[in-house]
Image (tube, grey):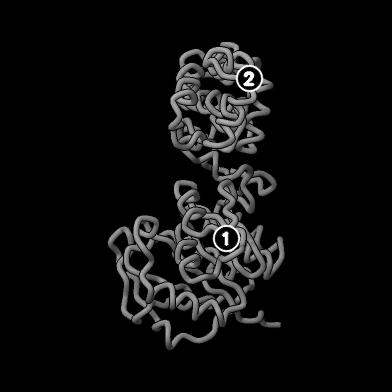
């Protein structure tokens, strides 16, 4: 029996990320080799070709007004989206396509287009880790999940940055055709069906902006200067000459966290930097103020969902991959 055709419309625009289009498109194209029947249509607002972030021109099949109804609509992102208002014509086109689609999905900063189109109001969503705070501020009713690789809320999907579009496309493929076909596609493309850990493991820091309050800035400086010292709530409060209760209120008011969680984040960021510099996990734990490797491992599990050793293997060098280049089928039970 021939597979049921599934129409996919991709809304493209100038300066869009090329991989946001090509990554999911390769997943669907590869799926067709294993028995699916995805039919991709490239749509722009005007019907004219667009130029991508790498300078290549992408031909377009139709304009948004003439486009048929699609079962799936994909909206890629672009580097310029978070820093300027979304073009009204682009958001309106996204709204028209989405209203007639079975499901709509954004890749990376494409979430800003869906947000401008009113398609994420009151919904859970994500975007590239660099822009989750801005997305949340721009759309207060949206519940942004900053660590998610992708988020499904009803028939609306959003994904993290760039390559997360491949993760999202695999998830859509599994919904349509089940895990066996999806596993074949993942193996063929040499990617994982589901990577372990969220996108925080790719971020530069978990601390966020430096505190504005002088007392909190002083605490940050003290912890960074001597992370292994006693930074308990009572000790910190005594050093800055406020009560523990008042210090806790200050952290809640400005940083929406507790003093102890903030101390752990500073130590955690220092441990990440030490691992990136080539220190062993045990050394990183000691130098960053964790009492043991086990306590560091638990912190990594909480924040990133991976162990310190696995984090280091992923981000210290690319050379380790050359030793296993002959392996073409990753273990799909565990993240890359």
**Residue 261 visible to the viewer:** yes
Say if 66 sits above or below 332 in the image: below
Query: Camera-side residue: 244 or 179?
Result: 244
Q: Which of the 4 image quarters holds residue 294?
A: top right
Q: Which mark is residue 141?
A: 1
Placement of the N terminus among the 4 image quadrants? bottom right
**Residue 282 visible to the viewer:** no
Say if 143 sits above or below 92 in the image: above
Please state the horizontal and vertical placement of residue 323, each as a whole percent of the image: 51, 34
Tell me the element at label 2. Answer: helix
Query: Camera-side residue: 308 or 317?
Result: 308
Q: Residue at x 55, y 30 (%)?
A: 250
Distance from label 2 to label 1 (Cα)?
34 Å
Please state the horizontal and vertical placement of residue 180, each as a whole percent of the image: 71, 61
Please state the horizontal and vertical placement of residue 103, each as a whole percent of the image: 60, 73
Disc 2 crowd, CA 10 A, few/some/many (<14, 14-19, 20+): some
Q: Residue at x 36, y 70 (%)?
A: 87
Q: Which mark is residue 233?
A: 2
Say if 12 sits above or below 221 in the image: below
Q: Earlier in the sequence, mark 2 or mark 1?
A: 1
Tell me the element at label 1. Answer: loop
Placement of the C terminus among the 4 image quadrants? top right
**Side of 298 relative to 88 (left or right):** right
Please state the horizontal and vertical placement of residue 79, each as a whole percent of the image: 36, 56
Q: Residue at x 51, y 64 (%)?
A: 106
């Amino acid at each position: 029996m021939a597979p049921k055709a599934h129409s996919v419309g991709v809304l493209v625009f100038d300066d869009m990320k090329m991989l946001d289009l090509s990554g999911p498109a390769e997943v669907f194209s590869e799926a067709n080799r294993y028995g699916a029947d995805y039919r991709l249509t490239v749509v722009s607002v005007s019907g004219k070709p667009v130029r991508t972030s790498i300078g290549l021109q992408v031909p377009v099949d139709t304009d948004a007004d003439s486009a048929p109804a699609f079962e799936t609509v994909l909206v890629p992102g672009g580097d310029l989206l978070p820093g300027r208002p979304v073009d009204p014509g682009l958001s309106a086109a996204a709204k028209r396509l989405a209203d007639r689609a079975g499901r709509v999905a954004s890749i990376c900063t494409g979430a800003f287009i869906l947000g401008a189109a009113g398609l994420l109001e009151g919904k859970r969503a994500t975007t590239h880790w660099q822009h989750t705070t801005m997305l949340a501020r721009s759309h207060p009713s949206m519940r942004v999940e900053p660590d998610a690789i992708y988020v499904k809320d009803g028939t609306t999907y959003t994904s993290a940055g760039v390559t997360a579009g491949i993760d999202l496309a695999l998830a859509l493929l599994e919904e349509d055709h089940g895990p066996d076909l999806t596993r074949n596609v993942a193996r063929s493309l040499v990617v994982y069906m589901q990577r372990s850990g969220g996108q925080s493991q790719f971020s530069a820091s978990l601390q966020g902006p430096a505190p504005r309050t002088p007392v909190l800035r002083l605490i940050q400086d003290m912890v960074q200067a001597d992370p292994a010292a006693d930074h308990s709530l009572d000790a910190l409060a005594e050093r800055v000459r406020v009560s523990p209760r008042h210090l806790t209120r200050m952290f809640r008011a400005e940083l929406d966290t507790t003093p102890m969680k903030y101390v752990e984040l500073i130590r955690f960021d220092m441990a990440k930097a030490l691992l990136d510099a080539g220190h062993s996990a045990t050394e990183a734990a000691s130098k960053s103020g964790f009492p043991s490797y086990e306590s560091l491992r638990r912190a990594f599990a909480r924040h990133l969902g991976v162990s310190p050793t696995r984090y280091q293997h992923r981000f210290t060098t690319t050379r380790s991959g050359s030793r296993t280049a002959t392996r073409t089928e990753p273990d799909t039970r565990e993240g890359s």
